[in-house]
Image (cartoon, grey):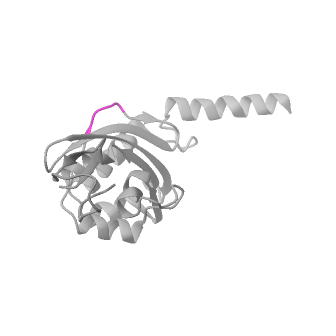
Amino acid sequence: MRFNFSVASLVTLACSTLVAASPACKCLTKTDSTELVDAYARMIGAFNSEDAARYLTEDFRSHSQSINTFFNPFSPSDDYTFNRTSFEQAQLNQAGTPLEIVSTPVVDCTHISFVWTSTFGTGRKARGITILSTVQVDGQWRINHFDVEFNSLNWAYNMGQYYCLFGNAVGNATVCGAPPAAGKLF
């Protein structure tokens, strides 16, 4: 029994560490991971429904405390941000925010992690990290969940919002300490 456990552990380690192309491993290949990272960047930067249909599972969910803060600063951090339908609607109803992948993606058997930057609006660079969780559906890798966190203050600034820091306005505002106004985050 101890031997079986050790062999199974080695096979699992080999599949997840080497990102083998073997169908027995059912792990992402480098090509698979590159395709999914590129699809993610397109869905954030210039959304199209075809990518969503091809790369997101039907039960897709995303989580981002950074985004949840925009919707409701007091939202519990364990709330999902989007399901597939709400993600597609949100992406269709906003201007694209191009992403530049700035790190080599780190690939586990079914997870991909990478760092990105986005510069838009007022031109402040926002840096973020995304972890894609994937599954195989009919032989094709799809994203069934992602976690994303980023510099939400720079993101808000780029969208024309502002915040007060030590009594000084950062962004499109001249007064801090006044009652909250439209566009003020905190």
Residue 128 visible within the image = yes
Q: Specify start and end residues of the magenta stretch as a single range.
A: 100-104
Residue located 38% across and 35% down the image:
105
Q: Position of residue 57 (x, y in %)?
A: 45, 63
Q: Position of residue 99 (x, y in %)?
A: 24, 45
Q: Judge left or right: residue 130 versus residue 14.
A: left
**Which of 65/74 is in front?**
74
Count of numbered tags:
0
Q: Position of residue 37 (x, y in %)?
A: 34, 45
Would you identify the image quadrant in which residue 9 lies?
Answer: top right
Residue 28 visible within the image = no
Is 80 inside the magenta-drawn segment?
no
Question: Residue at the right extreme?
Answer: 1
Q: Main secondary structure of the magenta part?
A: loop
Residue located 35% across and 59% down the image:
70
**Which of 3/144 is in front?**
144
Q: Position of residue 137 (x, y in %)?
A: 48, 59
Residue located 14% across and 51% down the image:
121
**Which of 102/3 is in front?**
102
User: Does 13 sit above or below residue 159?
Assistant: above
- Say which quadrant the N terminus sits in: top right
